[in-house]
Amino acid sequence: LPVYHLNFVYRLKNVRDYESAGASTPGLLLPYFVPTAHHPVPGPKGRDFDGVFVGHYEPDERYPSIAALRAAGIRVKIHGTGWGGCPELGDERRLITAARGEQYSEVVSSAHFALSFYSKLNSDTYTRRVFELPAMATVLVSTRTPEMNELFADGTEAILFSDAAELVDRVRWLLAEPGRAEAIAAAGFARCWASGYDVDSRMRALVDTLRSAL
């Protein structure tokens, strides 16, 4: 790492990791959405599900959070890998499939909201899905962190929560008023483009940084 002029990392934590390893000038390159892959796909019947989670299984808060929503009568569909390791799901484990390519956008677009959880194994405080999901014009419902408070306006561009109880309360609020979810989804979609969360904007910023530094 010390032999490079610049190093770019995924997380704020990684900046400190790289500095401790002797890297000079570590910079933060946030993840992004790819417009050709992550975009709204209106279905013939509109929104079929209340919510969806697309992601891998970890034995953390993701399944208890989904279970809390379901116990409250909120319909949440799961897509992803590794869910065979979640014994609480019982026979449903065999029915869960990954959603890749265009199906990813189709699945997310079929729900009023899409959940995002962060990997404890990776020390995440955001993930690429927090940019992909609102870019599909579906409400992002995500774990609250200081970084997320900077990326999206809570309650108007996304819904953030700290625990399962707050998650249930906020999703009930989201779904209670007709049109509320669509308004927040539209605002989150607009924020993604206005703030340059797309891959082209990220790469333009990267090139500008390289030109300035080198």
Image (tube, rainbow, N blue to C red):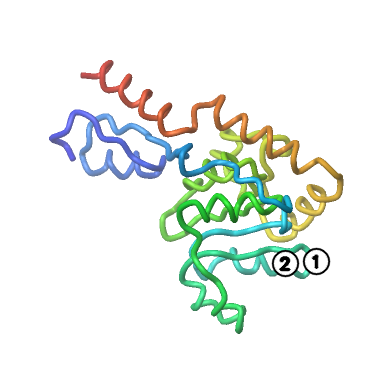
Q: Is residue 89 left or right of residue 199?
A: right
Q: Nearer the viewer, residue 176 or 11?
A: 176
The residue under the point 26% across, 22% down is 210
Q: Position of residue 202 (x, y in %)?
A: 40, 30
89 in relation to 53, above or below: below
Q: Position of residue 173 (x, y in %)?
A: 82, 49
- Quadrant of the image for the N terminus? top left
Q: Nearer the viewer, mark 2 or mark 1?
A: 1
- In primary-sequence order, the first of circles 2 and 1 is 2
The residue under the point 42% across, 37% down is 30
Task: Classify 10 Å Cα crowding around label 1: few (below 14), some (14-19), many (20 and above).
Answer: few
- Give the amino acid at mark 2: Ala
Q: Are marks 2 and 1 in contact (CB under 8 Å)?
A: no
Q: Is residue 141 left or right of residue 205?
A: right
Picture disc at residue 193: none
Q: Nearer the viewer, residue 178 or 170?
A: 178
Q: Position of residue 161 (x, y in %)?
A: 68, 50
Mark 2 vs mark 1, CA separation in Å: 9 Å
Task: Classify 10 Å Cα crowding around label 2: few (below 14), some (14-19), many (20 and above).
Answer: some
Residue that mark 2 sits on = 68
**Residue furthest out toward the front:** 44
- Give the amino acid at mark 1: Gly
147 in relation to 127, above or below: above
Q: Position of residue 118 (x, y in %)?
A: 51, 54
Residue that mark 1 sits on = 73
The residue under the point 54% across, 26% down is 195
**Residue furthest out toward the top:** 212
The residue under the point 40% across, 29% down is 200
Q: Is residue 31 left or right of residue 61?
A: left
